[in-house]
Image: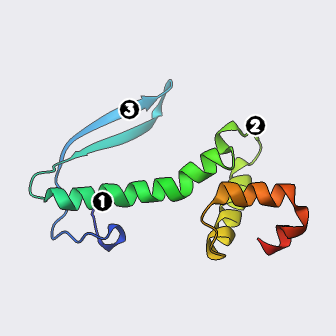
């Protein structure tokens, strides 16, 4: 992972990887995941803190809203769930573009007042 302007942090060099381990998924040995551990030495704590805050900002603005407000984790859709996930993302992007900061309240208002759904 190279931290760059996307996290608001600019580092001069990429972290060094110290170990590689493989995690087997189920009984299929062909499906393995590589896991790398990065050295934190050489980077200031403020740079790591900014990167972590940037990651959690994405988590709080996107994934948490999808899990809690849209009940995505409770979804029982088994055929093509990615299509519904994209539709939820599309709806959230429209809400964000229109300046809605409280998605749960906007979804509640839209559900209880169908006439205002066109405004969202």
27 w.r.t. 15: above or below: above
Q: Is residue 37 left or right of residue 102?
A: left
Q: Position of residue 65 (x, y in %)?
A: 59, 52
Find disc 3 in the rendering and name its residue: 23
Q: Residue at x 9, y 57 (%)?
A: 42
Q: Which residue is mark 2?
A: 76
Left or right of 33 on screen, residue 114: right
| Residue 120 shown left or right of residue 68 in the figure | right
Characterize the local packing of mark 2: few (<14), some (14-19) or many (20 or more) Cα atoms within 10 angstroms. Answer: few
The residue closer to the viewer here, 22 or 105, is 105
Residue placed most toward the observer, 14 or 40: 40
Residue shown at 50%/26% (left/top)? 26
Q: Picture quarter containing residue 79?
A: top right
Q: Quadrant of the C terminus?
A: bottom right
**Residue 115 rendering spot, x and y as whole percentages:** 90, 67
Element type at marker 3?
strand
Q: Of callouts 2 and 1, which one flags the residue occurring earlier in the amino acid sequence?
A: 1
For the point 61% across and 45% down, the residue is 67
Could you tell which of marks 2 and 3 lies nearer the N-terminus? Answer: 3
Outermost right residue: 115
Q: Is residue 68 visible?
A: yes
Q: Which residue is mark 1?
A: 51
Between circles 2 and 1, the one closer to the viewer is: 1
């Amino acid at each position: 992972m190279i931290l760059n302007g996307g996290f608001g942090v600019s580092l001069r060099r990429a972290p060094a990887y110290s170990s590689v381990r493989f995690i087997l998924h189920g009984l299929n040995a062909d499906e393995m995941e590589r896991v790398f551990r990065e050295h934190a030495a050489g980077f200031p704590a403020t740079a790591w803190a900014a990167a972590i805050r940037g990651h959690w900002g994405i988590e709080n603005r996107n994934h948490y809203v999808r899990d809690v407000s849209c009940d995505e984790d409770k979804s029982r859709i088994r055929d093509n769930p990615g299509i519904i996930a994209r539709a939820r993302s599309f709806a959230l992007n429209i809400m964000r573009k229109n300046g809605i900061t409280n998605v749960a309240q906007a979804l509640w208002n839209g559900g209880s007042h169908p006439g205002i759904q066109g405004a969202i």
